[in-house]
Amino acid sequence: QVQLVESGGGLVQAGGSLSLSCAVSGLAFSVYTLAWFRQSLGKERAIVAAIKWGPGNTYYTDSVKGRFTISRDNAKNTVYLQMNSLKAEDTAVYYCAARPLGYDFGYSTTDYNFWGQGTQVIVSS
């Protein structure tokens, strides 16, 4: 049984930082692309960042470039999202997702096979 379990969400002031983690089990972690999506009220779930093999194979949506960092630890079957300089517009439920490694990262929800339950991030202005 595949499980993705996010943690690390919470309430933070604008300009602050949060670190999200997603522990993955039930699949061959090292051969999966991992991603973070987010969904805010009234909006569709959208990709934030994705990682293939390591730091040289990452994708970020424009709004988080230079502020967020995605990383993975294959020994711990965990993917991380370090979020710095948070803004009110970063408020959302954050989800981790997994798909088998391929040529593309996969940028839409339909590209990903497995999902976590989400963790809430609230940034107060």
Image (cartoon, rainbow, N blue to C red):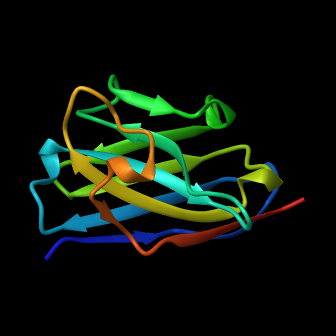
- Rendering coords of residue 51 (x, y %): 34, 37
Q: Residue sitting at 53 percent across and 72 percent down?
A: 119
- Rendering coords of residue 11 (x, y %): 72, 71
> Which residue is at the far top?
56
- Rendering coords of residue 90 (x, y %): 71, 53
> Which residue is at the far left?
28
Quadrant of the image containing the N terminus: bottom left
All told, the count of numbered labels is: 0
Q: Residue sitting at 36 percent across and 57 percent down?
A: 97
Q: Residue sitting at 37 percent across and 63 percent down?
A: 22
In terms of depth relative to the viewer, which is nearer, 35 or 108?
Answer: 108
In terms of depth relative to the viewer, which is nearer, 76 or 97?
Answer: 97
In terms of depth relative to the viewer, which is nearer, 55 or 41?
Answer: 41
- Rendering coords of residue 120 (x, y %): 61, 72
Q: Is residue 65 above or below residue 95?
A: above
In terms of depth relative to the viewer, which is nearer, 75 or 110?
Answer: 110
Asked where in the image residue 101 lies, by quadrant, the reply is top left
Left or right, residue 110 beside residue 118? left
Quadrant of the image containing the C terminus: bottom right
Q: Residue sitting at 14 percent across and 45 percent down?
A: 30
Q: Is residue 39 above or below residue 9?
A: above
> Which residue is at the far front?
110
